[in-house]
Amino acid sequence: QVQLVESGGGLVQAGGSLRLSCAASGSIFSVNNMGWYRQAPGKQRDLVATITSGGGTNYADSVKGRFTISRDNAKNTVYLQMNSLKADDTAVYYCNANIEWPTVTRRYWGQGTQVTVSS
C-alpha cells in the first residue's frame, strides 16, 4: 500500500508565497516521476509541474518563473515553492507520483490541499 500525504496549503494574499510538500510512504521500490496538478472549481485538473528522478523539470506556462518544483529522493518527497501568487492560482493542488513495487509501476495521487489566494 502506498500513500501520498500533502501539506502546506492555506490562505495567502496575492503576491505572497507558499510551499507545498508531498511525502510518499509504504511499499516503495523506487519513485520515478513526481508532479503537482491543480483543479479550480468547475475546471479540469491541469498540470502545474513535474520532476524526474534525475531532477529534470517541466512547468506549465502559467507558473514559469514563479513556481519551483524540487524533490528529496532520500525522503521520497516532492516540494512546490510558489512565489508571486495570483488569485488565478487558487485551486486544490494534488501531488502525483509514479511508484514502482516490486516490478510494477503504478500512478498514485494525494488527497489534495487547498490553496486560496486573496486579491
Image (cartoon, rainbow, N blue to C red):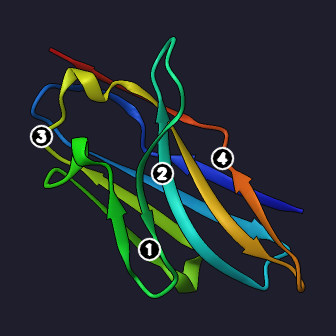
From the viewer's perspective, tell me whether residue 31 is left or right of residue 66. Answer: right
Which badge, 4 or 3, is on the more N-terminal residue? 3
**Amino acid type shown at disc 2:** Trp
Do the residues bearing badges 3 and 2 touch, measured as CB atoms within 8 Å? no
Label 3: how many residues lie within 10 Å, few (<14), some (14-19) or many (20+)? some
The quadrant of the picture occupied by the N terminus is bottom right
Q: Nearer the viewer, residue 7 or 39?
A: 39
* Residue 47 x/y as whole percent: 45, 46
Which badge, 4 or 1, is on the more N-terminal residue? 1
Which residue matches tag 4? 110
> 87 above or below 8?
above
**Amino acid type shown at disc 1:** Arg
**Quarter of the figure with residue 4:** bottom right
User: In 3D space, how far apart are the residues under numbered discs 3 and 2 (Cα atoms)?
Assistant: 17 Å
Which badge, 2 or 4, is on the more N-terminal residue? 2
From the viewer's perspective, tell me whether residue 118 is left or right of residue 73. Answer: left
Which badge, 3 or 2, is on the more N-terminal residue? 2
**Amino acid type shown at disc 4:** Gly
Disc 1 is placed on an element classified as: strand
Disc 2 is placed on an element classified as: strand
**Amino acid type shown at disc 3:** Ser
Which residue matches tag 2? 36
User: In 3D space, how far apart are the residues under numbered discs 4 and 1 (Cα atoms)?
Assistant: 16 Å
Residue ID at (26%, 23%): 88
Which residue matches tag 3? 84
Image depth: mark 2 or mark 4 in front:
2
